[in-house]
Image (cartoon, helix red, strand yellow):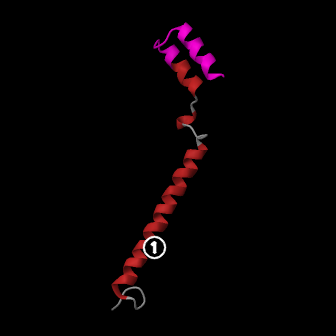
Amino acid sequence: MMWGGGYGMVGGLMMLLFWGVVIVLIVLAVKWFTDNQAGGSRGGRDAVDILRERFAAGEIDEEEFERRKKALER
């Protein structure tokens, strides 16, 4: 018996290649769609949110917080 409708092993390999490309395209489409649902940023957080978290955790003082916040708003 032959694979791929008479093209032998080449037809079978081409069929595997085709389905591999289809699967990769589906995975990439799902990844693109889920990344865009998050607003394009990781977890939907922006720089000011991260800055607020650092201030709340005590990593930076109020002066540093205000200086960086002002720089981000430009």
- 63, 20: nearer the viewer: 63
Report how many numbered discs are placed on residues in the image. Answer: 1
Q: Is residue 66 left or right of residue 25?
A: right
Q: What residue lies at 61% left-to-right and 19% top-to-bottom?
A: 71
Q: Quadrant of the N terminus?
A: bottom left
> In this picture, which residue range is highlighted in magenta?
54-74
- 44, 65: nearer the viewer: 65
Q: Is residue 4 left or right of residue 29?
A: left
Q: Compared to 31, does 51 lie above or below?
A: above
Q: What residue lies at 57% left-to-right and 17% top-to-bottom?
A: 68
Q: What residue lies at 59% left-to-right and 46% top-to-bottom?
A: 36
Q: Compared to 25, does 12 lie above or below?
A: below
Residue 47 image offset from top left, x and y in percent: 57, 26
Residue 51 image offset from top left, x and y in percent: 54, 20
**Residue 48: quadrant of the picture:** top right
Q: Does residue 60 show up magenta in the picture?
A: yes
Q: Compared to 17, does 7 lie above or below?
A: below
Q: For the residue carrying disc 1, how many other residues have a C-alpha within 10 Å: few (<14), some (14-19), or many (20+)?
A: few
- Please, what is the dominant secondary structure of the magenta stretch? helix
Query: What type is the residue that disc 1 sits on?
Result: Phe
Residue 26 image offset from top left, x and y in percent: 51, 61
Q: Is residue 63 left or right of residue 73?
A: left
Secondary structure at numbered mark 1: helix
Q: Circle 1 sits on which residue? A: 18
Q: Compared to 50, does 14 lie above or below?
A: below
Q: Quadrant of the C terminus?
A: top right
Q: What residue lies at 53% left-to-right and 36% top-to-bottom?
A: 43
